[in-house]
Image: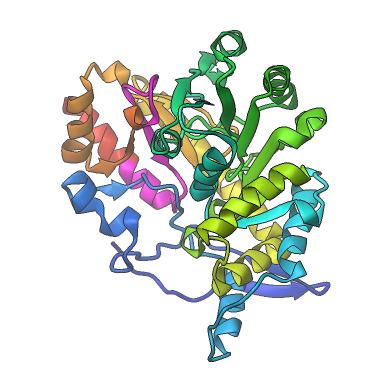
């Protein structure tokens, strides 16, 4: 891997606000940093040289304004117990108001160290062993063990593909809900498909849940990564009459490439529901967080608008480059063009390879590391998830290798 300068992105100050011109083409060597994406390649793929386009973090530098905020905190030599000031919730509230036109009350905000732990705690807080929890595959694979790992019954409501886009199967959902069904876990925007659910779709889903008393846990960790002219719709804003049974999980981790900070937020409007959740967080003693995560979140939400706008432009370019390359050079591999996220859901069934043969082909012949589609549940066989949140040269390298490997099949 070619090493380039680690100099910070160019910055100027305009009208009292930081304006960042980020260099997303810059290659930053992540090897030797205990990066799961890079340093675990041999362990995961059996090939330490695959181009890693799998784990959902980006190969772009975490913005300088976030790193500088952490560095300023490090100037104080004591890293003792800390608490979240009003600024913590305030920065988030201002952000979702600006970016998603959602008005959040400070009282609704609950801290969690991550969205996956937040999902697990929701399962524990709002269901009992043996209760039913619905997920909609193919979907983010930790949802499965968040349910089954706590001795709850998993109900699969598979998504349908219509016109190259995932849609809800609402008719089947109505049939599946029973008196034992307590919770539906929603991926919004959808991972791995990148579907940004519309307000109408979310309202229709929530209406069924409202009729049957099923709570909704909406994982909105990718909400900021929706490509214009589209926009993200928080599930609770699409169904305001059911807000008392909708829990929203968000985080700056995907948006600003800071997953290692282990800092996320839940929004729980209903006081009783919030107390049920917060009491369990207290009992589990997972609500302390860490001082650097707090600083990073506040910096991201206070200073990150321009950087994010630039990121979305670059990611959209990567998305379109990937789609056009497959259409022109590898038409037997098709792509669900995402409305959001930096993840592409690729259909490799046109290669005519069995699942294991496909996995071996990608690792040993194409030398690229992707997420295996079947990990995401029914509907994932023959598919792979590709992370295009990287410098374009890295994406170009991976696609060139894939083309050469396919040509030699």
Q: x%, y% of residue 74?
A: 54, 85
Residue 88 part of the magenta segment: no
Q: Image point 69% across, 23% down: which residue?
A: 213
Between 220 and 400, the one nearer to me in the picture:
220
Residue 113 visible in the picture = no
Q: How many marks?
A: 0
Quadrant in the rendering for residue 233: top right
Q: x%, y% of residue 287?
A: 57, 61
Residue 397 part of the magenta segment: yes
Left or right of 342 in this view: 398: left
Q: x%, y% of residue 71?
A: 55, 81
Q: x%, y% of residue 65?
A: 62, 72
The C terminus - image quarter: top left
Left or right of 96 in this view: 355: left
Quadrant in the rendering for residue 73: bottom right
Which region is colored magenta?
Answer: 376-398
């Amino acid at each position: 891997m070619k090493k380039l300068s680690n100099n910070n992105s160019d910055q100027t100050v305009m009208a009292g606000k930081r304006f960042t011109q980020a260099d997303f083409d810059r290659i930053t060597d992540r090897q030797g940093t205990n990066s799961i994406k890079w340093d675990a390649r041999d362990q995961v793929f059996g090939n330490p040289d695959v181009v890693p386009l799998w784990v959902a973090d980006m190969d772009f530098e975490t913005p300088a304004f976030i790193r500088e905020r952490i560095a300023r905190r490090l100037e104080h030599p004591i890293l003792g117990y800390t608490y979240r000031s009003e600024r913590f919730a305030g920065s988030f509230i201002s952000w979702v108001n600006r970016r998603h036109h959602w008005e959040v009350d400070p009282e609704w905000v609950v801290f969690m160290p991550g969205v996956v732990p937040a999902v697990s705690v929701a399962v524990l807080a709002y269901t009992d062993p043996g209760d039913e929890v619905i997920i909609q595959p193919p979907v983010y694979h930790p949802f499965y063990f968040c349910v089954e790992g706590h001795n709850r019954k998993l109900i699969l409501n598979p998504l349908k593909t219509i016109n190259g886009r995932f849609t809800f199967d609402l008719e089947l959902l109505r049939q599946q809900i029973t008196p034992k069904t307590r919770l539906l876990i929603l991926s919004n925007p959808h991972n791995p498909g990148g579907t940004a659910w519309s307000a109408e779709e979310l309202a229709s889903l929530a209406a069924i849940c409202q009729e049957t008393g099923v709570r909704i846990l909406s994982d909105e960790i990718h909400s900021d990564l929706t490509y214009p002219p589209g926009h993200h719709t928080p599930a609770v804003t699409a169904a305001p009459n059911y807000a008392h049974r909708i829990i929203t999980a968000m985080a700056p981790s995907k948006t600003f490439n800071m997953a290692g900070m282990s800092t996320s937020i839940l929004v729980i409007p209903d006081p009783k529901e919030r107390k049920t959740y917060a009491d369990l967080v207290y009992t589990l003693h997972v609500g302390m967080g860490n001082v650097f995560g707090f600083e990073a979140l506040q910096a991201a939400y206070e200073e990150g608008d321009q950087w994010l706008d630039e990121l979305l432009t670059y990611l959209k370019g990567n998305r379109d480059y990937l789609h056009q390359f497959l259409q022109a050079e590898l038409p037997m591999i098709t792509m669900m063009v995402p409305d959001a996220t930096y993840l592409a859901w690729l259909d490799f069934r046109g290669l005519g390879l069995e699942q294991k043969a496909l996995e071996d082909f990608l690792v040993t012949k194409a030398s690229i590391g992707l997420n295996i589609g079947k990990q995401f549940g029914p509907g994932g066989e023959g598919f792979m998830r590709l992370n295009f949140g990287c410098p374009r040269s890295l994406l170009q390298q991976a696609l060139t290798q894939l083309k050469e490997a396919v040509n030699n099949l």
